Image: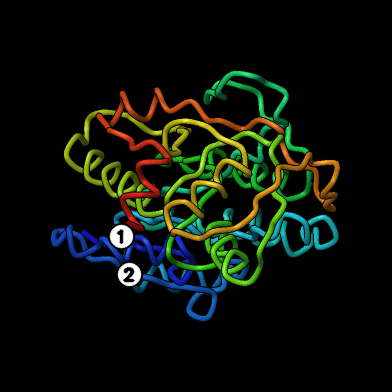
Amino acid sequence: MVVLVVGGLGQLGQSIQFISSNYPEITFQYVDVQDMDITDEVRVLQKFDKIKPQYCINAAAYTAVDKAESDLDKAHAINVVGVENIAKACRQNHTVLLHISTDFVFDGNQTSPYTENDEPNPLGVYGQTKLDGEKVIPTILDNYYIIRTSWLYSQFGANFMKTMIRLGNERDKLSVVNDQIGTPTHAVDLATALIKIVLFNTQHPTLNTYGVYHFSNEGQCSWFDFAKKIFEVNHINIQLTPIPTSAYPTPAKRPVYSVLDKTKIKETFDLSIKSWEESLKFYFL
């Protein structure tokens, strides 16, 4: 079985590589922008025709949330046009698509975890382009999974955890926002879930499990809580101060609450999901 991972040099792509040896029955092929610019439809079709994957995990995205506010064209090109090109290539090659989306498709006005049936309402350009990318897939493909995730971090790439560790080693004190609530997700846990979906779908060809799913680690916290736990796990002594979002203005507005309900993905694929605290300790102690 061949699984093509688009965005192979990103943190999710590297996380899939990290665990790939656990799945000898799968041949993983990794491409990044240098190998296949997803905004170039011809190059995408050529690469798919060459690799002929049974599955494609699209982990490529424009994720610079604040920069997207002034870089709409590029965000749209990658998060919408790029997704459209991948979906077309999947259709042509009878490839099942697993597309990664985000909690930023929601406005954060709820106080209970978002289910797949809740109405998206993005607050900014990043969230809107990710939602537009989601919407284009069903117009092209029937065999797809859209997996929304949140607050992704890992030992790979650039992310909040690595930024906190760097700042913790550079400074004596730090202020972190404490009124945005969500769930940190270790990219290796997401990678594992994606591969389990691939294997489940292969083993149960008559079951139609396609559609939209939510995945994150279990539990919820603020960015302040997350930072505090990161410093605790990594034995970094620093004076940490909670601050409101208003004290740290950014070009893009964030959802104040973006916890995702994982009931559907757990029940459909019989997944067991670690709490965010457990996962943080598991990978870094």
Q: Is residue 94 visible?
A: no
Residue drawn at x 72%, y 52% is: 175
Question: Residue tagged by mark 1?
Answer: 3
Left or right of residue 24, residue 2 in this image = right
Residue 201 drawn above or below residue 36: above
Left or right of residue 30, residue 198 in this image = left
* Secondary structure type for disc 2: strand
Toward which corner of the image does residue 51 lie, by quadrant? bottom left
Q: Residues within 10 Å of mark 1 (few under 14, many from 20)?
A: many
| In-front residue for pair 123/274 | 274
Task: Give x and y (percent) for residue 174.
Answer: 69, 56
Residue 281 drawn above or below residue 270: below
The residues bearing labels 2 and 1 have C-alpha atoms spaced at a distance of 6 Å
| In-front residue for pair 89/98 | 98
Query: Which residue type does callout 2 highlight?
Result: Gln
Question: Residue tagged by mark 2?
Answer: 29
Residue drawn at x 45%, y 67% is: 156
Task: Give x and y (percent) for residue 154.
Answer: 44, 59
Task: Give x and y (percent) for residue 237.
Answer: 54, 59
Q: Is residue 24 visible?
A: yes
Residue drawn at x 63%, y 72% is: 170
Residue drawn at x 74%, y 64% is: 74
**Mark 2 or mark 1: whose residue is earlier in sequence:** 1
Q: Are marks 2 and 1 in contact (CB under 8 Å)?
A: yes
Left or right of residue 171, residue 48 in this image = left
